[in-house]
Amino acid sequence: MLSTNNSMLFSMLSNSSDVKLWVVLPAAGSGSRMKNTVPKQYLKINGTAIIEHTINVFLGNHEVQAIMVCVPPGDQRFSETKSSKNARVLTTQGGVSRAQSVLNGLNELDAAEHDWVLVHDAARPCLSAELLNHLIDTLRYDDVGGILAIAVRDTLKQASQDKRIESTLDRSTIWQAQTPQMFRYGLLKTALVKAIDQGLDITDEASSLELSGYAPAIVEGDSRNIKVTTAEDLDLAEFLLRPKQASAKQVQ
């Protein structure tokens, strides 16, 4: 955990206008479960690419300094999007893993140790401006940061490899992680480097902080903040975004 001196320093810096907010979007995955030749972040919902829906939410927040998009090596599609023309949208090459992609993005940001970084799935386009603001406001003065998550509603079973039930889990203590995940730039970067160097399996940013001994906070999310992974998710996202698309103005 943070030492007392570091905790006091972060608390003081959190109250300073010098603290900035940055966004990293890992978008280097192939989206193989979608079974489509086009990477899922470039599939269109209501005429707009998923990744552009995602970016527009952050462009609509005046606190965000820049959005770093981590694209696949050799990617040509992102440069064809309207989002890529925005001065606040930057790109870098993603890595072979999510953790490496995020680290690549962090390395390209002109951020200070105490700045905040929001890491968000490029294929999670239904994040609302209200939920984004709620996350930021809740964690603004936190020493470490935290994540959006929703409480598990269904009964969960622990199964064996041959798909036989071994036990029933206590769902009251289990949360389903979402993004954005919001952490101090310096802490997140150090934790990711450590995890990668040790060859640890990192499936989200909070995991790297946990492995370094920190306890990220949970901020209650929204079940509508879905990640598009399958064709069924694409249909649901189209339904959820239809009202927004009709009323929201495109961010330039």
Image (cartoon, rainbow, N blue to C red):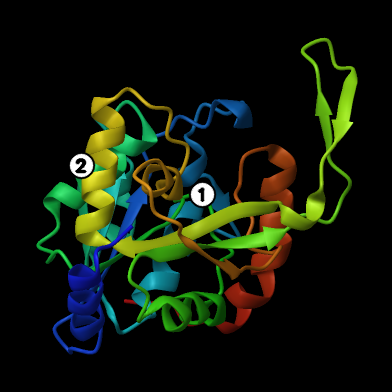
- At a point 82% along the width and 47% down the height, the residue shown is 170
Q: Which mark is residue 123?
A: 1
Residue 31 seen in render:
yes
Instruction: Between residue 211 and residue 235, name the one nearer to us.
Output: 211
Height in image: 134 above or below 96? Answer: below
Residue 196, how many percent across, how many down? 28, 30
Quadrant where the N terminus is found in the figure:
bottom left
Q: Counting residues from the N terminus, which is met first, the one under dot 2 or under dot 1?
A: 2
Instruction: Between residue 163 and residue 234, name the one nearer to us.
Output: 163
Residue 5, how many percent across, how many down? 18, 72
Height in image: 197 above or below 230? Answer: above
Q: Which residue is mark 2?
A: 104
Q: Residues within 10 Å of mark 1 (few under 14, many from 20)?
A: many
- At a point 51% along the width and 49% down the height, the residue shown is 123
Instruction: Between residue 102 and residue 8, name the one nearer to us.
Output: 8
Q: Residues within 10 Å of mark 2 (few under 14, many from 20)?
A: many
Q: With 58 as the anchor, is 110 left or right in this view?
A: left
Observer-side mark, 2 or 1, equals: 2
Label 1: which secondary element: loop
Residue 206, how many percent across, how many down? 44, 50
Quadrant where the C terminus is found in the figure:
bottom left
- Disc 2 to disc 1, C-alpha distance: 19 Å
